Image (cartoon, rainbow, N blue to C red):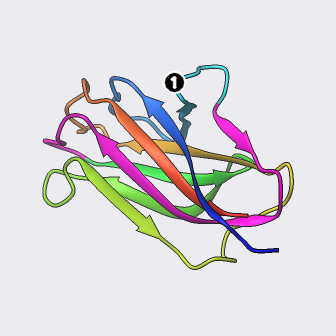
Amino acid sequence: MKRIPMMLGPWYQENVAAAQTDVAIDLNGNASRNSMPMIRNGSVLGIAVHSNAPCTAGLLTVEATINGAGTGLTVSLDPAVHTTDNQATENKLLDNFIPGGLIGCRITTNAGWLPITADITVDILVEQ
């Protein structure tokens, strides 16, 4: 069976607060849902973040999750290099899931994160 890469998401957080630690992000802005079940075996391949306002201070990091556990695949926004967009990829078969595995993401911001009026979206690339 041919494996097909596909984008999942978006996960969305409005008015990103400072000083968050590993907070699950809502899928499509739906507060009752923060993960997406997978139908087949597969692996996470990438993650991308976009902010509607540039980061002016601090650091924001998002991490892809499988069944609520961090994968180590992260991407960040900072005031020096990646102010509004960033993405990261990894080789397949590093972060695997099985049918029913829940793909999600979580956010961490430090106390200096600005602007707290920024809204972010996150997309995750998987292969099944």
**Residue furthest toward the top?**
31
Q: Viewer-proximal residue, 56 or 102?
A: 102
Q: Position of residue 1 (x, y in %)?
A: 83, 74
- Tell me if residue 41 comes above or below residue 14 in the rendering: below
Quarter that holds the C terminus: bottom right
- Tell me if residue 76 comes above or below residue 119 in the rendering: below
As drawn, is 6 to the left or to the right of 46?
right
Residue type at mark 1 is Gly
- Place residue 57 in its image quadrant: top left
Bounds of the magenta segment: 34-58
Q: Residue at x 46, y 60 (%)?
A: 74
Q: Position of residue 121 (x, y in %)?
A: 41, 38
Q: How many marks?
A: 1
As drawn, is 63 to the left or to the right of 87?
right
- Place residue 43 in its image quadrant: bottom right
Q: Residue at x 38, y 49 (%)?
A: 49
Q: Residue at x 58, y 21 (%)?
A: 30
**Residue furthest toward the right?**
99
Q: Viewer-proximal residue, 112 or 80?
A: 80
List the residue tagged with mark 1. Answer: 29
- Place residue 118 in its image quadrant: top left
Q: Position of residue 82 (x, y in %)?
A: 21, 57
Badge 1 element: loop
Asked if residue 84 lies in the magenta stretch, the reply is no
Asked if residue 44 lies in the magenta stretch, the reply is yes
Q: Position of residue 32 (x, y in %)?
A: 66, 20
Q: Residue at x 67, y 69 (%)?
A: 95
Dot 1 alpha-carbon crowd within 10 angstroms: few under 14, some 14 to 19, many 20 or more: some
